[in-house]
Image (spheres, coloured by chain):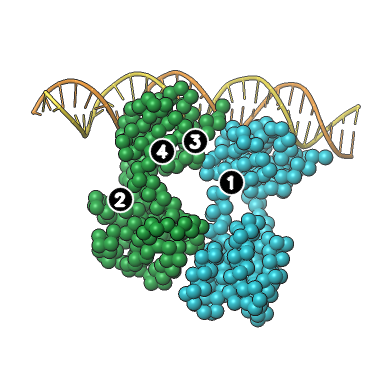
Chain colours: A green, B cyan, C orange, D yellow
DNA sequence: TTGAAGCTGTCATATTTATGTCATGTTGGG
DNA sequence: CCCAACATGACATAAATATGACAGCTTCAA
């Protein structure tokens, strides 16, 4: 799809799966898509490879003998050195539970098997793009709203805005996931991260704080309530 | 209580292979599994059949005289009308090259011969499930009406429409079940969910609310009353 | 170590919006 | 023309969300 022959060094992707057949299939697809592929057949080797090779992304099978994917994921996220490496979990069943646990533990995406190579590639690219943007720390600009991750600063029409840490992360989440509804549960997962057990109404309160903070002349409708569903950030201030 | 005998239309599957024996074998297996089977013996006929019959999935032989499977695959993926039809490639040898090229060109799966009918069926089902999942996420477009499930947003001619939760679900139901009459009882079952006991007239009221909401210039006749039977959603504004 | 300042999550309460029912007006077919 | 089926507007109630206050925690610096 994107054949800019970019001199950009190829991204390194580590595949962790105990089944050789699956590793092969993924490997071929990713190789064809221009990635540099590494493989590991269990969590031990995977961990070693991650330390040694610093891959740009890890595809991690959920179910593996011995240390499971989830355990490895947790271990990686605990260690500061590896915490930022994006992880995509592969799971055999579309179990809601594993999905939730995976996101909780900090996976960046989650692909239920079976999936098409095309889907895989597109998700990998999506995650890399997002990470890339975050790594570049490019400011996000929406009309007069400027979100500058580098300076950890937000401003509207030149006016600097004061946000608490949670509201900052909430805004960041919304800015990177616009035009789409998220339930309170999802927002808790994404913004508060892992294993928190909070009242969902807490989200309402932080939404309000965020709204209050960014409500400057004509900018009040970015964060929209979708009754019965959750919240949505939209750059189109279309709603009357 | 629930008489959804749901006449779920069978999936149409097109088999493209130059060898009659293989077509027969596939055809029998798929038919037994409850699919509607179409056949074509070369790329020409296959292309025509795809345009005419809009199959839900194509099983495409890699090696064929004349236009090869790969060429046909590429052609299908280039044309927007056919790009979304899932393709499963059948190849005689597990050649790495063909595998790569096939995946590259956008095949959804790849089955090396020989394979068992059971494996075939299971892969076909897997692909159809996945496509179904993905389709749920895609916006539904009917003329100027856009229904975006991810954004949980409905618009007509660019104007955002405000719907209550029930009207939203009602519209979603209609959009995924067009051109067919549903009784009030059925609508209650599908939209409100099984175990509610409500006055059937309630449906009338929500129909009215939905109609009101989406009644913008020239779009008033999507939801049609069928006296004595129920309601029907039709994209053809057939209003006599 | 202590105190001030700022954050957080929870609650109780206010406000807004959605829902189902009813009474009444319309319509269409026999 | 009449009746049954449907449309419509109003309304009480229920449900969801917004808001303001507050007490426990952290952080930071003196």
Residue B139 is marked as: 1
Marks 2,3: beta carbons within 8 A: no
* Disc nearest the viewer among 1 and 4: 4
Q: Could you tell whether B143 is left or right of A41 in the image? A: right
Q: Give coordinates of residue B238: x percent, y percent.
A: 78, 42
**Label drawn at residue B164:** none
Q: Is residue B176 left or right of residue A90?
A: right
Whole-Å distance between the Cαs marked 2 and 4? 21 Å
Q: Which SS class for mark 1?
A: loop
**In this orientation, does residue B205 appear?**
no
Task: Give how far across and how far down residue B141 sits, in percent.
Answer: 64, 45
Seen in the picture, residue B215 relative to B110 is either above or below; the reply is above
Q: Which residue is mark 2?
A: A84
* Residue at 41% in and 28% down: A156
Q: Name the chain letter of the residue that bears numbered label 4.
A: A
As displayed, is residue B105 above or below residue A222? below
Q: Please name the residue that numbered disc 3 is placed on.
A: A234
């Amino acid at each position: 799809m994107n054949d800019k022959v970019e001199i950009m060094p190829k991204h390194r992707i580590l595949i962790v799966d105990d089944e050789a057949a699956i590793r092969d299939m993924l490997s071929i697809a990713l190789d064809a898509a221009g990635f540099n592929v590494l493989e590991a057949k269990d969590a031990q080797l995977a961990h070693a490879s991650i330390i040694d090779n610093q891959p740009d992304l890890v595809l991690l099978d959920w179910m593996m003998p011995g240390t499971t994917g989830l355990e490895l994921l947790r271990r990686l996220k605990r260690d500061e050195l590896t915490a930022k490496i994006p992880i995509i979990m592969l799971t055999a069943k579309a179990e809601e539970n594993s999905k939730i646990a995976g996101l909780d533990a900090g996976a960046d995406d989650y692909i239920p098997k079976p999936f098409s190579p095309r889907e895989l590639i597109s998700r990998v690219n999506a995650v890399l793009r997002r990470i890339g943007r975050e790594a570049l720390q490019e400011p996000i600009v929406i009309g007069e709203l400027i979100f500058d991750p580098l300076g950890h600063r937000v401003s509207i029409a030149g006016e600097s805005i004061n946000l608490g840490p949670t509201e900052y992360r909430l805004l960041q989440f919304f800015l990177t996931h616009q035009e789409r509804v998220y339930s309170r549960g999802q927002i808790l997962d994404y913004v508060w991260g892992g294993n928190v057990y909070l009242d969902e109404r807490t989200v309402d309160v932080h939404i309000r704080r965020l709204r209050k903070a960014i409500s400057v002349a004509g900018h009040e409708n970015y964060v929209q309530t979708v009754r019965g569903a959750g919240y949505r950030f939209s750059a189109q201030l279309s709603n009357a």
